[in-house]
């Protein structure tokens, strides 16, 4: 629902959570990492650090540890007492979207197309399931033929929906600007990735970032600060959860 850790809540009798929404189910992972951080914090400093702040700091530190940029993370977010299954289904962009729908989806949350391109550079790390890019691998001519052949071995035409491939095939565990170089070489894994360099209005920005990593880092850091301030709960709103998966 915003930077309120609503995404971490399990279903309850009063609401269906976001974990089972289409874009998240069988996909979002790492809940165990957040739980470990939370339980260590509750031991040394109980009831002070929200799950929402943990997510914001973990995102920043993950990028920094993988040689990417760093940025200041404002703290004081509080955790939601509910979640929105419908919001997760309607508001998250799909990997099947074309550029205009991607732009609209980010604009609905107050982000410019420029910020969307910068934020998409996070696909320089991480993985995607075969289900998310099968159609691109088997049916799209805008995918590099050599990469398509190697992806097919791990993503058959039928079955293997959950088998993972790197979003950035060149440097999968380094936060660099190779995502943008990949796009210029038709090596975007998702349809939505390649849309950012497909003859449209965002091509020139992809070129800039592929040539200049420092510009990408600076724009990415600013956009992450902005994303980290999306509808936070503050003051006496919400709560500091004891267990990130459950309302107190
Ligand atoms: C532009 C619209 C976006 C679309 C359509 C999109 C879509 C996706 C999809 C389909 C996956 C793979 C999920 C799976 O197969 O399980 C993925 C992974 C990922 N996305 Fe995005 N994404 C977008 C923007 C972003 C943004 C703004 C960020 C963060 C700033 C981000 C960070 C990541 C990361 C880190 C992964 C890898 C996760 C992992 O390895 O577990 N994405 N994205």
Image (cartoon, rainbow, N blue to C red):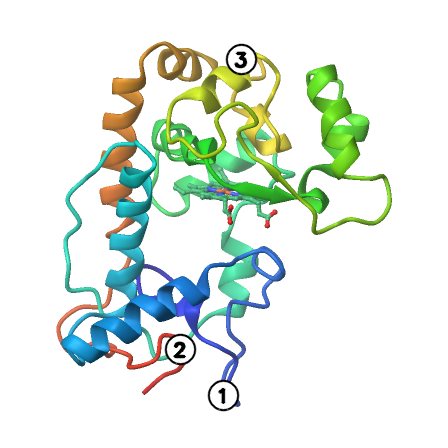
* Tag shown at residue 100: none
**Secondary structure of residue under mark 1:** loop
Query: Which circle, 1 or 3, is nearer the viewer?
Result: 3
How far is mark 2 from mark 1, CA to CA? 9 Å
**Which part of the image, by quadrant, shows the N terminus?**
bottom left
**From where the camera sits, is residue 223 visible?**
yes
Task: Name the spot of residue 47 as percent of width and height, x first.
Answer: 18, 80
Tell me whether the residue at label 2 lies in contact with that at label 1, contact meaning CB atoms closer than 8 angstroms. yes
In this rendering, would 64 be left or right of 136?
A: left
Residue 246, image quadrant: bottom left
Task: Name the spot of residue 138 as percent of width and height, x first.
Answer: 81, 29
**From where the camera sits, is residue 202 visible?**
no
Q: Residue at x 27, y 62 (%)?
A: 54
How far is mark 2 from mark 3, CA to CA? 42 Å
Residue hosting label 3:
184
**Secondary structure of residue under mark 3:** helix
Residue hosting label 2:
82
Task: Name the spot of residue 122 as percent of width and height, x first.
Answer: 41, 36
Q: Residue at x 50, y 53 (%)?
A: 91
Residue hosting label 1:
14
């Amino acid at each position: 629902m915003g930077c309120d850790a609503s995404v971490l809540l399990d279903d309850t009798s009063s609401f269906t959570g976001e974990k089972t929404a289409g874009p998240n189910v069988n996909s979002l992972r790492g809940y165990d990492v957040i739980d470990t951080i939370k339980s260590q914090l509750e031991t040394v400093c109980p009831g002070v650090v929200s799950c929402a702040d943990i997510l914001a700091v973990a995102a920043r530190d993950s990028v920094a540890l993988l040689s990417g940029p760093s940025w200041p993370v404002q703290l004081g977010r509080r955790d939601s007492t509910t979640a929105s299954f419908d919001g997760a289904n309607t508001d998250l962009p799909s990997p099947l979207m074309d550029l205009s729908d991607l732009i609209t989806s980010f604009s609905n949350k107050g982000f410019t197309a420029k910020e969307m391109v910068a934020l998409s550079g996070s696909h320089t790390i991480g993985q995607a399931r075969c289900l998310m890019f099968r159609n691109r691998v088997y049916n799209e001519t805008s995918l590099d033929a050599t990469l398509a052949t190697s992806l097919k071995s791990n993503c058959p035409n039928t079955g293997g929906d959950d088998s993972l491939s790197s979003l950035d095939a060149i440097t999968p565990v380094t936060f660099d600007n190779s995502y943008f170089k990949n796009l210029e070489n038709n090596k975007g894994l998702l349809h939505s990735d390649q849309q950012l360099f497909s003859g449209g209005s965002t091509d020139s920005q992809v070129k800039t970032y592929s040539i200049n990593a420092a510009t990408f880092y600076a724009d990415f850091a600013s956009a992450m600060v902005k994303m980290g301030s999306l509808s936070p709960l503050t003051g006496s709103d919400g709560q500091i959860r004891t267990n990130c998966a459950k309302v107190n």
